[in-house]
Image (tube, rainbow, N blue to C red):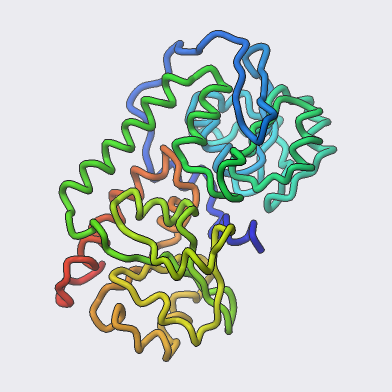
């Protein structure tokens, strides 16, 4: 279930990246010299003796960053959810094997590809998996300083940038997105301090919200918004919280955001009589993310965040302005 919640919805990297647009200029010859040491999981850094030529990505976010940082043609293994094709933001169509369907790593398939770099910074890799994969090739896992799936997008970008010899390019991409955040915080002061939940429906009886260390919640806190402490307490050391429909009032905040991916899910949420009693609903402070926005929020990378900020911020501004008459598109 943890993997399912992480990649909900598991949109193709190519679809999200195509919505984000291409960078205005190709990457130049900016590689830093090797060897490089990348500190990742625990006390076991990845040491790369030379430029990696055969890269396996275990999760869609890692694949997206490898592609964004100019190493598309060196990907030989990818997770499910990454579409292959000729476009520069897709994995190359030839000789690329799916090695981690639904974030389940097939170690033998990885080893057979003879990689010289394995990347899984958003894969939820266990310590045992890390040890096994590190015996095959230098492996990038999320830092032990964060909960599973909780590594910030900046740290993910830096880690992969260092491994690819593209540390400077990674910093430039990070700065570009952080500048966007700063501009939005200045232009939309109503977001500062506003409480918000990013919520989802599990089944007929269970709903939930993402905790403050999840990428979808970090998107909001980077804009100055606040994840309610009750949601943080319920999430604990996980990236999500889960509770019964009868506790739906936990979601009733300044802004209520729904991640919607399954067919018919919006209609099911709107038909819930308990939801219809929430002040956020009555006062027009509710937002339903589109499939594309939900995917971009789940990836929360230097490619998907600019697109998401363009589409989501106007909705957040309308929801948080204190005027029930302002429509949220």
Q: Nearer the viewer, residue 56 or 214?
A: 214
**Viewer-side residue, 224 vs 315:** 224
At 41% from the left edge and 51% from the top edge, which residue is drawn? 218
Instruction: Identify the residue at image location x=45%, y=46%.
Output: 300
Residue found farthest to the bottom: 273
**Residue 94 seen in render:** no
Q: Is residue 249 above or below residue 222?
A: below
Asked if residue 20 is positioned above or below residue 73 in the image, the reply reads: below
Q: Residue 313 or 222: which is nearer the viewer?
A: 222
Which image quarter holds the C terminus? Answer: bottom left
54 above or below 187? above
Where is residue 34? Give x, y as percent.
60, 10
Direction from residue 297 to residue 151 in the image, left or right: right
The reply, left or right, for residue 179 in relation to residue 45 is left
Instruction: Between residue 229 and residue 60, name the one nearer to us.
Output: 229
The quarter of the image holding the N terminus is bottom right
Position of residue 28 in the picture relative to residue 6 (left or right): left
Q: Residue furthest top?
A: 33
Horizontal arrangement in the rendering, residue 62 relative to residue 42 (left or right)? left
């Amino acid at each position: 279930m943890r993997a399912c919640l992480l990649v909900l919805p598991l949109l193709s990297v190519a679809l999200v990246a195509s919505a984000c647009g291409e960078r205005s200029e190709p990457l130049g010859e900016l590689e830093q010299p090797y060897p490089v040491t990348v500190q990742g999981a625990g006390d076991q850094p990845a040491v790369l003796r030379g430029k990696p030529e055969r890269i396996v990505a275990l999760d869609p976010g890692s694949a997206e960053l490898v592609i964004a940082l100019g190493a598309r043609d060196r990907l030989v293994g990818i997770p499910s959810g990454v579409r292959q094709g000729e476009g520069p933001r897709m994995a190359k169509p030839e000789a690329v094997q799916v090695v981690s369907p639904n974030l389940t790593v097939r170690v033998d398939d990885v080893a057979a590809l003879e990689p010289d770099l394995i990347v899984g910074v958003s894969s939820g890799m266990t310590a045992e998996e890390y040890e096994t994969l590190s015996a095959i090739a230098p492996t990038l896992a999320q830092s032990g300083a964060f909960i599973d799936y909780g590594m910030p997008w900046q740290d993910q970008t830096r880690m992969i940038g260092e491994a690819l010899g593209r540390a400077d390019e990674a910093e430039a991409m990070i700065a570009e997105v952080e500048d966007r955040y700063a501009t939005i915080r200045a232009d939309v002061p109503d977001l500062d301090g506003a409480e918000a939940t990013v919520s989802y429906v599990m089944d007929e009886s269970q709903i939930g919200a993402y905790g403050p260390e999840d990428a979808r919640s970090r998107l909001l806190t980077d804009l100055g918004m606040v994840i309610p402490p009750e949601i943080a307490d319920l999430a604990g050391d996980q990236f999500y919280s889960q509770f019964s429909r009868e506790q739906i009032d936990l979601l009733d905040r300044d802004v209520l955001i729904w991640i919607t991916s399954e067919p018919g899910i919006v209609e099911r949420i709107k038909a819930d009589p308990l939801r219809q009693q929430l002040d956020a609903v009555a006062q027009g402070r509710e937002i339903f993310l589109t499939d594309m926005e939900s995917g971009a929020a789940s990836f929360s990378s230097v490619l998907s965040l600019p697109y998401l900020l363009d589409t989501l911020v106007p909705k957040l501004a309308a929801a948080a302005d204190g005027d029930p008459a302002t429509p949220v598109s």
